Image: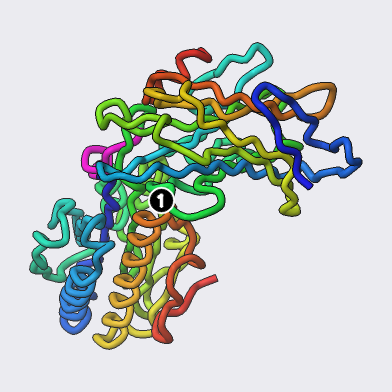
């Protein structure tokens, strides 16, 4: 079976404390509940969570939806986005099965990155490792006006921005992530086609602005 | 009106005997098949394009467009995805080649289909019917079509070389092949070109 790996890279720096981090946890709950209702996603999507503050850690390894448990997140310290990209690269090396001429591996991983600030580490180093791997669609979300969209645009051409990092807006973002994973799952399961661009995903809601 | 070929026959892709000319900047090679009814595990057929040099050799796996490499690094050949069932009418898989832009190191492109894990699943081309390969030009005009005959030669065969396009005097020609091989793995097919 070819899995569709979905990686969530979530900023858990100090500025996310309070309403934003609670909204992210609720958002993950919404995401998992919705995907568990979707036969295509249930069949193919696997979920992992990587958080980053003064370091990056994989708090949930790649897990099938039925076994996925919402991790407890705490918001502290700085924003090591580079470390998160580096960890993502290393993690996919051993978690994602590659295709060879004899064996079909997993689909290319789908990545959603959410951050509300500026990276505080050497993010270009992590970015270089990330760029060496092949990913499917990568969406970076700048949560709130303080997030640096130009950094995110170096990671991916698919960048969205939330006007505010409040609970309603973050919920709307996660609902859209859920719809995006659903349509990606449907596409690989029924057509064998990986989605590659933002324009192939469901249109984002009003709270989620596409950054051009 | 598209030309229907028989096995071994060739045709110039740029223009046909009726004087029609075709735009070869983007040529879509459509491959289709149906699997004869009956239960059992679903057939998973994969189409691949092998980009060969003037001696008919493959430089490496990076010059094969397949499920593990859906787009050639040059950007001049790609797959439109992996159909896992063969369900529905029309093309089941499409390989797209930009013949006009194709680098001069490539003189021939071989189009093949193999039954993924066919040997272990007891599946073979004797159970596949209505198999065809066709070439469509940039404007959607069908240039040529070759329907593989469902004769007994496909029994116990898990790979079929459907056809090939090759350079000839500044143009591209298409040749209908329909050559069957018993192996089910792409790797075993490409060994013949290395």
In-image side of B16 versus A34 (left or right): right
For the point 54% across and 21% down, which residue is it? B179
For the stretch drawn in magenta, the main secondary structure is helix
Q: Closest to the observer: B29 or A75?
A: B29
Write down the region rendered in magenta.
Answer: A90-99
* Residue B117 % position (x, y): 31, 31
Tell me if residue A97 is in the magenta stretch. Answer: yes
In-image side of A19 versus A142 (left or right): left
Q: Closest to the observer: B174 or B53?
A: B174
- Name the residue beneath numbered marker 1: A192
Count of marks placed on residues: 1
Q: Quadrant of residue A32?
A: bottom left
Q: Is residue A37 above or below residue A8?
A: below
Tell me if residue A100 is in the magenta stretch. Answer: no
* Residue A128 shows up from this direction: no
For the point 80% across and 45% down, which residue is it? B23
In-image side of B171 versus A150 (left or right): right
Q: Quadrant of residue B31?
A: top right
For the point 64% across and 25% down, which residue is it? B7
Identify the subunit bearing mark 1. A
Q: Quadrant of residue A170?
A: bottom left
Q: Is residue A13 above or below residue A54?
A: below
Q: Residues within 10 Å of mark 1 (few under 14, many from 20)?
A: many
């Amino acid at each position: 079976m070819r899995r569709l790996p979905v990686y969530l890279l979530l900023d858990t720096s100090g500025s996310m404390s309070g309403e934003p981090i609670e909204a992210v946890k609720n958002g993950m709950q919404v995401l998992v509940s919705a995907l568990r209702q979707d036969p295509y996603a249930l069949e193919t999507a696997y979920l992992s969570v990587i958080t980053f503050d003064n370091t990056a850690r994989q708090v949930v390894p790649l897990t099938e939806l039925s076994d996925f448990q919402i991790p407890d997140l705490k918001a502290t310290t700085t924003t090591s986005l580079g470390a998160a990209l580096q960890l993502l690269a290393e993690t996919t090396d051993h978690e994602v099965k590659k295709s060879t001429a004899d064996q079909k591996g997993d689909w290319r991983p789908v990545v959603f990155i959410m951050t509300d600030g500026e990276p505080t580490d050497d993010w270009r180093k992590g970015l270089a490792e990330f760029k060496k791997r092949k990913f499917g669609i990568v969406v970076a979300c700048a949560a709130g006006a303080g997030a640096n969209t130009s950094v995110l645009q170096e990671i991916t051409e698919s960048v969205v921005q939330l006007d505010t990092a409040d609970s309603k807006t973050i919920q709307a973002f996660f609902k859209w992530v859920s719809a995006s994973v659903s349509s990606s799952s449907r596409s690989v399961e029924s057509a064998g086609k990986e989605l590659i661009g933002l324009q192939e995903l469901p249109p984002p809601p009003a709270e989620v602005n596409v950054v051009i | 009106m598209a030309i229907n070929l028989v096995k071994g026959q060739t045709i110039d892709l740029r223009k046909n005997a009726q004087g029609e000319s075709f735009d070869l900047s983007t040529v879509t090679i459509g491959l289709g098949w149906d699997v004869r009814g009956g239960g059992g595990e679903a057939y998973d057929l994969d189409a691949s394009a092998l980009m060969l040099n003037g001696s008919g050799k493959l430089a490496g796996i990076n010059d094969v467009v397949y499920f593990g490499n859906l787009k050639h690094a040059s950007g001049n050949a790609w797959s439109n995805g992996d159909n896992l069932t063969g369900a529905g009418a029309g093309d089941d898989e499409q390989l797209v080649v930009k013949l006009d832009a194709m680098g001069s190191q490539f003189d021939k492109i071989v189009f093949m289909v193999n039954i993924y894990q066919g040997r272990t699943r007891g599946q073979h081309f004797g159970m596949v019917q209505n198999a065809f390969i066709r070439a469509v030009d940039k404007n959607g005009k069908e240039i040529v079509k070759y329907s593989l005959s469902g004769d007994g030669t496909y029994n116990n065969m898990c790979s079929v070389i459907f056809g090939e396009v090759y350079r000839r005097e500044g143009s591209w020609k298409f040749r209908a092949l329909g050559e069957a091989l018993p192996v089910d793995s792409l790797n075993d097919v490409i060994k013949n070109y290395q």
